[in-house]
Structure formats: C-alpha cells, structure tokens
Image (cartoon, grey):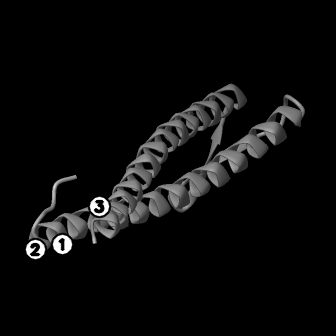
C-alpha cells in the first residue's frame, strides 16, 4: 500500500469504522427480529398442534378486534398454516440479510486490521 497522507488515511479509517458500526447495529436488529419471528412461529405451531388434536365437532373462535367469530376448523387451520409459512419465509429472508450484514461487518474489520498493520510496518 502506497503511503497516504495522514488526513486521507484518517478519512478512510472513519468511513470504514462507520460501516462496521452500522453493520453491527443492523445485524443486532436483524437478530432480534429473527428471534421475535421464531417465537411467533413457535406459538403458531403449538396452536396448530392443539387444533389438530381436538375432536371434529369443537367450535373454534378467532379474535377480531374486541370480539370473537366462530370459524370453521378447515378455515382456521388453513389460515394458521398460511401465517406460519409467511413467518418461515420472513425468517429465511431475515437470515439471508443477517449473513450479508455479518459479512459486511467482518470485511470492514479486516480492512481496518489491514490498514493498521500496513501503517505500523511503514513506521
């Protein structure tokens, strides 16, 4: 690496450091969102298991605002499974985003290490 003026080097370091910090924050948010969606999906899975274990003539009710509506069992199961699939897809997308952010963070850290090593060798 050619010798850069101190001001230019400082600007590069600040920019890389900002990228690392932003990536780390976004990664933490993404991980929290994944955990929340995993909890929601688990609750849905448990609900589906409970509904399928019930006898066929049981009335099922769905919360709508401040009231409850009776819903046919096949409709309820279909809605819950669709919601579970949507959450699963969302979790998968969030995992991909997390991997990208993690790679971005690791790359920024590697760049900082390389810069510090090259400047310490020059001096």
Along the line of sight, the residue nearer the viewer: 78 or 25: 25
Look at 54% across and 62% down and name the residue there: 66
Look at 42% across and 43% down and name the residue there: 100
Q: Which percent across, then down, holds residue 111?
A: 34, 55
Q: Which mark is residue 31?
A: none
Mark 2 → mark 3, Cα distance in angstroms: 19 Å
Residue 72 falls left or right of residue 25: right
N-terminal-most mark, 1 or 3: 1
Q: Taking 87 as reference, is 73 above or below it?
A: above
Mark 1 → mark 3, Cα distance in angstroms: 14 Å
Along the line of sight, the residue nearer the viewer: 102 or 78: 102
Q: Is label 1 in contact with label 3 (beta carbons under 8 Å)?
A: no
Disc 3 is placed on an element classified as: helix
Q: Which percent across, then down, holds residue 95?
A: 52, 42
Q: Residues within 10 Å of mark 1 (few under 14, many from 20)?
A: few
**Disc 2: which residue:** 7
Q: Taking 21 as reference, is 88 above or below it?
A: above
**Disc 3: which residue:** 19
Q: Which percent across, then down, holds residue 36?
A: 58, 57
Q: Taking 27 as reference, is 93 above or below it?
A: above
Mark 1 or mark 3, which is nearer to you?
A: 1
**Disc 1: which residue:** 10
Say which quarter of the image contains residue 105: bottom left
Q: Which percent across, then down, holds residue 56?
A: 85, 28
Disc 1 is placed on an element classified as: helix
Disc 2 is placed on an element classified as: helix
Task: Tell me the quarter of the image containing the C terminus.
Answer: bottom left
Say which quarter of the image contains residue 88: top right
């Amino acid at each position: 690496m050619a010798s850069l003026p101190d001001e230019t080097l400082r600007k590069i370091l600040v920019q890389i450091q900002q990228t690392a910090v932003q990536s780390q924050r976004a990664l933490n948010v993404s991980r929290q969102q994944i955990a929340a969606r995993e909890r929601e999906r688990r609750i849905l899975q448990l609900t589906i298991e409970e509904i399928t274990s019930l006898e066929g003539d049981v009335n099922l009710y769905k919360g709508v605002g401040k009231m409850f509506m009776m819903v046919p069992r096949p409709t309820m199961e279909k809605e819950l499974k669709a919601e579970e699939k949507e959450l699963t897809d969302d979790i998968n997308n969030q995992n991909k985003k997390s991997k990208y952010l993690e790679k971005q963070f690791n790359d920024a850290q590697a760049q900082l290490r390389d810069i510090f090593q090259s400047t310490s060798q020059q001096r």
